[in-house]
Structure formats: C-alpha cells, structure tokens
Image (cartoon, grey):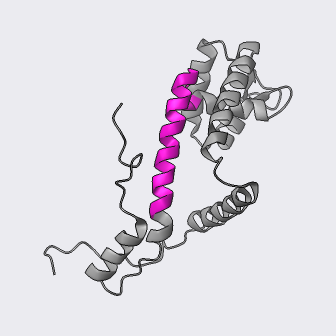
C-alpha cells in the first residue's frame, strides 16, 4: 500500500512553515499556522481513516449519517425528512436521495407523517437497526484507538478548544479582513 505523505515523517513541521513565511513576508501574521496546519493534517488523516473503516464495515458515510441520526432520535426511531435534513446538515434533495437508497436496501421505511399532510416520516427497520448497531460499534471501537494516546482530561480539553474554535469559525471570524488580490509579478 502506498504511504500517504502524512503517514511518514516527511511532513514539514508547522513551526518551519511559519518561520519560512516570517522570512518571506515579514509582518504577515503567521501564528495561525501553528494551529490550522496541524488541524488540516489531522482532519485529513481522520477522514481517510473513517473512509477506510467504513469501507471495511460495508457502509458509506451518507447512509451511516442517515441511520445514526434516526437511531439517536430514540424510540420510535422516526423523523420527518425535514428533521433529517436539518440534523444531517444536508439539503432536502440530498436527504431524499439518501432515504430512497436506504429504503431500497431495506434499512428504512417511508410513510405519511402524522405531523402534517405534506410531511414524510422515515423509520428504521429491523435490518437498519442491525446495520447501524454493527457499524457504529465497529467505527467507535476503531476511533477509540485513534485517540488512545490522549488522557481523558486531554480529550476533554481538546474537545472544548475545538468547539470554541468552531464557534469562532462559524461566527464569521476573519470574514471582514480585507484580502489582497494576487500580485501579477513577484516582488
């Protein structure tokens, strides 16, 4: 199997990247590199790990998202397509495609909703319960190994810091910073 560049020791440390930009563009703020570069690298590695694990478990990310959302809703494990779209953070069209595919595979059923005449309810089938149970157990067991080098307190602190960073990013942090158009020639 081909080694991904971040799997080995060849990745340039974030501090070296920041130092190079300090040298090349003095005065440009570079402290974010020490946070964002490792986050990008870890996010890429985690996404690759999740993809490989889900492939081994025989489920795609979209189906797992749909089934997990229904299972976490609790008994009777039923949500409307609108609720599913909101909780899965996808469009109505995307959720419709996910539900249709899962229904063809016998993982969910659709029926008219009691909430409104136009709403459609989606419910986990027994097969859907089994698939999501097996997939989530396998995925979480594997992901536990990925964070095993962090003590419980470190996990909690890291989780809190990532939530805080996420709030800043979602809140528009940095959107008001004027961006310079790219220069046509090298200074």
| Image x and y of residue 153, in percent | 75, 59
Region rendered in magenta? 37-62
Asked whether residue 110 is in view, the answer is no
* Camera-side residue of 142 and 126: 142
Look at 69% across and 24% down and name the residue there: 132
| Number of marks in picture | 0
Q: Is residue 116 above or below residue 103?
A: below
Vertical side of 81 occupied by 165: above or below:
below
Q: Tell me which secondary structure the magenta stretch mostly adopts.
A: helix
Residue 41 visible, this orientation? yes
User: Along the horizontal axis of the image, is 16 left or right of 88?
Assistant: left
- Residue drawn at x 63%, y 35% is 142
Toward the right, the furthest residue is 75
Q: Residue furthest bottom?
A: 27
Q: Nearer the viewer, residue 38 or 9?
A: 9
Q: Is residue 42 magenta?
A: yes
Q: Is residue 41 magenta?
A: yes
Give the quarter of the figure containing the N terminus: top left
Front residue of 67 and 134? 134
Q: Identify the residue at image location x=78%, y=27%.
A: 78
Quarter of the image that includes the C terminus: bottom left
Above or below residue 40? Residue 100 is above
């Amino acid at each position: 199997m081909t080694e991904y560049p971040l799997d080995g020791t060849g990745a340039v440390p974030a501090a070296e990247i920041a130092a190079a930009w300090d040298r090349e563009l003095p005065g440009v703020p570079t402290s974010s590199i020490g946070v964002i570069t490792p986050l990008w690298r870890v996010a890429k590695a985690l996404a690759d790990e999740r993809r490989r694990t889900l492939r081994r478990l025989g489920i795609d990310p979209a189906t797992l998202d749909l089934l997990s959302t229904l299972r976490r809703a609790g008994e009777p494990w039923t949500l409307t397509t609108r609720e599913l779209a909101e909780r899965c953070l996808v469009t109505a069209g995307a959720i419709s495609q996910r539900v249709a595919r899962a229904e063809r595979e016998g993982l969910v059923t659709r029926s008219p909703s009691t909430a409104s005449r136009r709403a459609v309810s989606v419910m986990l089938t027994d097969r859907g319960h089994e698939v999501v149970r097996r997939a989530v157990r396998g995925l979480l067991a594997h992901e536990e190994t990925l964070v095993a080098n962090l003590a419980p307190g470190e996990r909690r602190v890291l989780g809190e810091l990532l939530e805080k960073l996420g709030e800043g990013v979602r809140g528009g942090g940095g959107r008001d910073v004027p961006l310079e158009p790219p220069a046509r020639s090298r200074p």
